[in-house]
Protein backbone atom coordinates (compact mmCIF):
# COMPACT_ATOMS: atom_id res chain seq x y z
CA UNK A 1 0.00 0.00 0.00
CA UNK A 2 1.47 3.33 -1.05
CA UNK A 3 1.76 6.09 1.48
CA UNK A 4 0.10 9.32 0.57
CA UNK A 5 1.87 12.51 1.35
CA UNK A 6 -0.02 15.72 1.95
CA UNK A 7 0.18 18.31 -0.76
CA UNK A 8 2.54 21.18 0.04
CA UNK A 9 0.83 24.40 1.06
CA UNK A 10 0.09 26.86 -1.72
CA UNK A 11 2.86 29.43 -2.01
CA UNK A 12 1.98 32.73 -0.41
CA UNK A 13 2.16 35.86 -2.50
CA UNK A 14 2.95 37.81 0.71
CA UNK A 15 6.32 39.42 0.13
CA UNK A 16 7.88 42.79 0.80
CA UNK A 17 8.97 42.63 -2.86
CA UNK A 18 5.30 42.72 -3.89
CA UNK A 19 4.26 46.38 -3.95
CA UNK A 20 0.60 45.55 -3.30
CA UNK A 21 1.64 43.75 -0.10
CA UNK A 22 4.07 46.47 0.97
CA UNK A 23 1.64 49.34 0.36
CA UNK A 24 -1.32 47.48 1.89
CA UNK A 25 0.70 46.90 5.05
CA UNK A 26 2.15 50.42 5.17
CA UNK A 27 -1.15 52.17 4.49
CA UNK A 28 -3.05 50.04 7.03
CA UNK A 29 -0.44 51.01 9.61
CA UNK A 30 -0.67 54.67 8.60
CA UNK A 31 -4.47 54.74 9.11
CA UNK A 32 -3.98 52.87 12.40
CA UNK A 33 -5.85 49.69 11.44
CA UNK A 34 -2.68 47.67 12.06
CA UNK A 35 0.15 47.98 14.52
CA UNK A 36 2.29 45.03 13.47
CA UNK A 37 5.48 44.38 11.56
CA UNK A 38 5.29 43.38 7.93
CA UNK A 39 6.04 39.72 8.70
CA UNK A 40 3.46 39.57 11.50
CA UNK A 41 0.75 41.14 9.33
CA UNK A 42 0.37 38.37 6.76
CA UNK A 43 -1.93 36.31 9.00
CA UNK A 44 -3.73 39.14 10.82
CA UNK A 45 -7.46 38.64 10.28
CA UNK A 46 -10.05 41.29 9.57
CA UNK A 47 -11.67 40.88 13.00
CA UNK A 48 -8.35 42.03 14.51
CA UNK A 49 -8.53 45.39 12.74
CA UNK A 50 -9.32 48.50 14.78
CA UNK A 51 -12.58 49.16 12.88
CA UNK A 52 -13.98 45.69 13.70
CA UNK A 53 -16.68 45.80 16.37
CA UNK A 54 -18.12 42.43 17.40
CA UNK A 55 -21.25 44.16 18.71
CA UNK A 56 -21.93 45.96 15.41
CA UNK A 57 -24.65 44.79 13.07
CA UNK A 58 -23.52 43.48 9.67
CA UNK A 59 -24.79 46.71 8.06
CA UNK A 60 -22.80 48.93 10.42
CA UNK A 61 -19.71 46.74 10.05
CA UNK A 62 -20.03 47.01 6.25
CA UNK A 63 -20.16 50.82 6.47
CA UNK A 64 -17.06 50.83 8.68
CA UNK A 65 -15.28 48.46 6.27
CA UNK A 66 -16.29 50.63 3.32
CA UNK A 67 -14.73 53.62 5.09
CA UNK A 68 -11.44 51.72 5.48
CA UNK A 69 -11.59 50.60 1.84
CA UNK A 70 -12.20 54.18 0.65
CA UNK A 71 -9.26 55.46 2.70
CA UNK A 72 -7.01 52.78 1.23
CA UNK A 73 -8.23 53.47 -2.33
CA UNK A 74 -7.41 57.15 -1.95
CA UNK A 75 -3.98 56.40 -0.54
CA UNK A 76 -3.13 53.86 -3.24
CA UNK A 77 -3.95 56.24 -6.08
CA UNK A 78 -3.04 59.56 -4.43
CA UNK A 79 -0.02 58.74 -2.28
CA UNK A 80 1.35 55.51 -3.75
CA UNK A 81 0.88 56.56 -7.41
CA UNK A 82 -1.08 53.44 -8.36
CA UNK A 83 -3.21 53.22 -11.48
CA UNK A 84 -6.20 50.96 -11.85
CA UNK A 85 -5.79 47.65 -13.64
CA UNK A 86 -7.65 47.32 -16.93
CA UNK A 87 -11.40 47.17 -16.28
CA UNK A 88 -11.03 48.32 -12.66
CA UNK A 89 -12.04 51.63 -11.08
CA UNK A 90 -12.35 53.34 -7.73
CA UNK A 91 -15.81 51.81 -7.32
CA UNK A 92 -14.77 48.24 -8.12
CA UNK A 93 -11.69 48.49 -5.92
CA UNK A 94 -13.64 49.84 -2.93
CA UNK A 95 -16.42 47.29 -3.41
CA UNK A 96 -13.99 44.36 -3.64
CA UNK A 97 -11.96 45.51 -0.64
CA UNK A 98 -15.17 46.07 1.37
CA UNK A 99 -16.43 42.59 0.49
CA UNK A 100 -13.23 41.13 1.92
CA UNK A 101 -12.96 43.41 4.95
CA UNK A 102 -16.32 42.20 6.32
CA UNK A 103 -15.19 38.55 6.43
CA UNK A 104 -13.77 37.99 9.92
CA UNK A 105 -11.38 35.20 8.90
CA UNK A 106 -9.83 36.84 5.84
CA UNK A 107 -6.24 38.00 6.30
CA UNK A 108 -4.13 41.00 5.39
CA UNK A 109 -2.49 38.78 2.76
CA UNK A 110 -5.95 38.13 1.27
CA UNK A 111 -6.62 41.87 1.23
CA UNK A 112 -3.29 42.49 -0.51
CA UNK A 113 -4.31 40.02 -3.22
CA UNK A 114 -7.50 42.02 -3.84
CA UNK A 115 -5.39 45.18 -3.93
CA UNK A 116 -3.01 43.55 -6.42
CA UNK A 117 -5.96 42.55 -8.60
CA UNK A 118 -7.20 46.16 -8.70
CA UNK A 119 -4.06 48.30 -8.79
CA UNK A 120 -0.88 48.60 -10.79
CA UNK A 121 1.68 50.36 -8.61
CA UNK A 122 4.35 52.61 -10.09
CA UNK A 123 7.44 50.47 -10.67
CA UNK A 124 5.56 47.20 -10.36
CA UNK A 125 6.79 44.35 -12.50
CA UNK A 126 4.07 41.84 -13.29
CA UNK A 127 5.10 38.17 -13.31
CA UNK A 128 5.16 36.54 -16.73
CA UNK A 129 2.31 34.07 -17.28
Image (tube, rainbow, N blue to C red):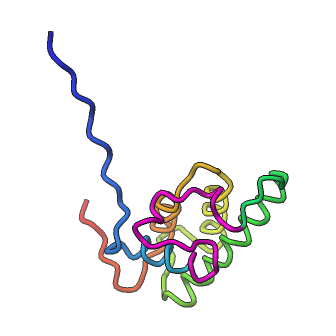
Residue lying furthest left in this view?
Answer: 2
Write the residue at 32% across / 46% down: 10
- Provide residue 12's location: percent of width, then percent of height: 35, 55
Write the residue at 45% across / 61% down: 42
Residue 68 lies in what quarter of the image?
A: bottom right
- Provide residue 115's location: percent of width, then percent of height: 51, 68
The quadrant in which the N terminus is found is: top left
Write the residue at 45% across / 67% down: 116
Q: Disc count in the image? A: 0
Left or right, 99 with reference to 39: right
Toward the viewer: 121 or 39? 39
Left or right, 88 with reference to 117: right
- Provide residue 109's location: percent of width, then percent of height: 46, 60
- Provide residue 51's location: percent of width, then percent of height: 72, 67
Residue 76 lies in what quarter of the image?
A: bottom right
- Identify whether 11 is placed above or below 65: above
* Residues in magenta, as a range: 28-50
Left or right, 70 with reference to 83: right
Residue 125 lies in what quarter of the image?
A: bottom left
The quadrant in which the C terminus is found is: bottom left
- Identify whether 124 is placed above or below 51: below
Residue 68 lies in the magenta stretch:
no
Left or right, 60 with reference to 129: right
Toward the viewer: 126 or 38? 38
Write the residue at 31% across / 74% down: 17
Toward the viewer: 125 or 104? 104
Residue 31 lies in the magenta stretch:
yes
Amino acid sequence: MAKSTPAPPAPSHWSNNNLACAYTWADLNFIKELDTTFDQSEKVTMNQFRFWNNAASPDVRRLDAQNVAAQLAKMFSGVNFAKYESGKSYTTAVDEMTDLLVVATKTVADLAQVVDDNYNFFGEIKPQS
